[in-house]
Image (spheres, rainbow, N blue to C red):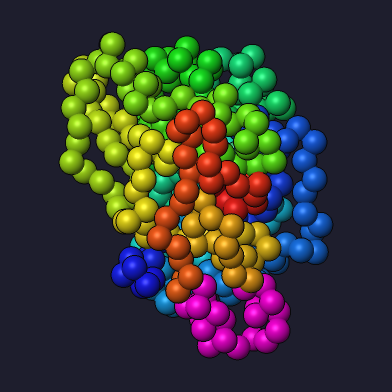
């Protein structure tokens, strides 16, 4: 419980800052990644996650960077699955760019993963290659199919980008409808080295995206929330549920239930604030689980009221130099 009486039950863990893509809204083309010695070992990650679970975390999402490019990441999933077996953890899930999903989907399902979020901004192979700077669409689609075949529920996450997503909108909605995938749109957040210069140009408010969607479909607001930041609409024509995450045009911090752990053991209690607590030091100082839990409690106690992202007045406020791959999106 934080000082604003928000129950923190959801941990997102970045297992690496590395990635095989360089999405334009996430990373610089020439990324300097962290030295490997700075990264937590899989055993350290497991100790940390287990301490969070002991303290009441019931939902854990593995992310990055690209989590599936970390060597032996499946060992980590396998170990974490004991917390599903014991009932302490209700959900173990991951966010991935899908490039390596085809070879891991069945193992993920065997570890108790039931849902995956796959980031996909276009179904056009050329545009995909250009937006991700080095990614290929075909293996991602193959990964999504493999996930579905393995019984995993797939949610597609699409970042709304001005001058880009307008054309991708209907193909993505139609494809998700036909394939039975949930779809959520996310406003681009001002994170990363060039956040201030580039993100304002990239920002396409979801109110505009929604208006475009309404040109073709009848939208009905749904009362349902999952306790997270998404708000949902139902498309009358297809019955599809579409989510909107609007960190810029609308704040949802008062009900925020999540914290993030970076791959170096920093605890970030807000995606949009600089403050963090170092858990790696405590972890490497001793094997004492009690000391670790005290440090986690202290970190949670510092969770701020909310973020300050704001693109109004044609400037970017609250921008973060930290990139999304470091914090874990
Ligand atoms: N590599 C994996 C992936 O792309 O799904 C997991 C990590 S990625 C950082 C997690 C999510 O953050 C992705 O859905 C990505 O689209 C999103 N993301 C990255 N940079 C963003 C930004 N500046 N604003 C909003 N979302 C962003
Ligand atoms: Fe990699 Fe995901 Fe960032 Fe794209 S959004 S560069 S796939 S970490």
Residue 293: say if magenta.
yes
Residue occupying image coordinates x 51% and y 51%? 272
Reply above or below: 326 against 278. Answer: above
Q: Residue 274: percent from the left, percent from the top?
A: 59, 57
Indicate the quadrant where residue 133 lies. top right
Q: Is residue 248 magenta?
A: no
Residue 247 % position (x, y): 42, 41
Q: Quadrant of the N terminus?
A: bottom left
Residue bounds of the magenta highlight: 279-299
Depicted 321 relative to depicted 205: above or below:
below
- Left or right of residue 327, residue 149 in this image: left
Give the camera-side residue of 5 and 242.
5
Percent from the top left, x then y, of residue 162? Answer: 51, 20
Q: Position of residue 46 (x, y in %)?
A: 58, 69
Residue depicted at x 32% and y 56%: 254
Which one is in front, 80 or 13?
13
Q: Is residue 96 left or right of residue 60?
A: right
Residue 261 makes an appearance in the image: no
Answer with the quarter of the image where residue 235 lies. top left
Q: Residue at x 71, y 53 (%)?
A: 71
């Amino acid at each position: 419980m934080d000082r604003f009486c928000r129950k923190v039950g959801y941990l997102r863990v970045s297992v690496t800052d590395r990635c095989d893509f360089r999405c334009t809204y996430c990373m610089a083309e020439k990324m300097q990644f962290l030295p490997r010695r700075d990264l937590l070992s899989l055993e350290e990650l497991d100790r940390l996650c287990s301490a969070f679970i002991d303290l009441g975390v019931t939902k854990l999402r593995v992310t990055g960077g690209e989590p599936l490019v970390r060597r032996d990441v499946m060992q980590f999933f396998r170990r974490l699955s004991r917390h599903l077996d014991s009932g302490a953890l209700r959900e173990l899930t991951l966010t991935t760019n899908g490039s390596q999903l085809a070879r891991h989907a069945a193992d993920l399902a065997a570890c108790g993963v039931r849902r995956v979020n796959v980031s996909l901004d276009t179904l056009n192979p050329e545009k995909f290659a250009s937006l991700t700077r080095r990614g290929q669409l075909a293996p991602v689609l193959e990964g999504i199919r493999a996930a579905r075949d393995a019984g995993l529920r797939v949610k597609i996450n699409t970042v709304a980008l001005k001058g880009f997503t307008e054309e991708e909108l209907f193909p993505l909605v139609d494809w998700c409808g036909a394939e039975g995938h949930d779809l959520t749109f996310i406003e681009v957040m001002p994170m990363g080295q060039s956040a201030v210069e580039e993100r304002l140009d990239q920002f396409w408010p979801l109110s505009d995206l929604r208006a475009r969607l309404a040109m073709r479909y009848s939208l009905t607001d749904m009362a349902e929330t999952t306790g997270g930041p998404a708000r949902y609409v139902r498309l009358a024509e297809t019955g599809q549920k579409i989510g909107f995450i609007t960190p810029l045009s609308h704040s949802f911090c008062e009900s925020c239930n999540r914290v993030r752990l970076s791959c170096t053991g920093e605890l970030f209690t807000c995606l949009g604030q600089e403050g963090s607590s170092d858990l790696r030091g405590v972890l490497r100082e001793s094997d004492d689980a009690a000391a670790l839990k005290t440090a986690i409690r202290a970190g949670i106690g510092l969770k701020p009221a909310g973020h300050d992202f704001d693109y109004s007045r044609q400037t970017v406020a609250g921008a973060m130099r930290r990139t999304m791959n470091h914090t874990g999106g």
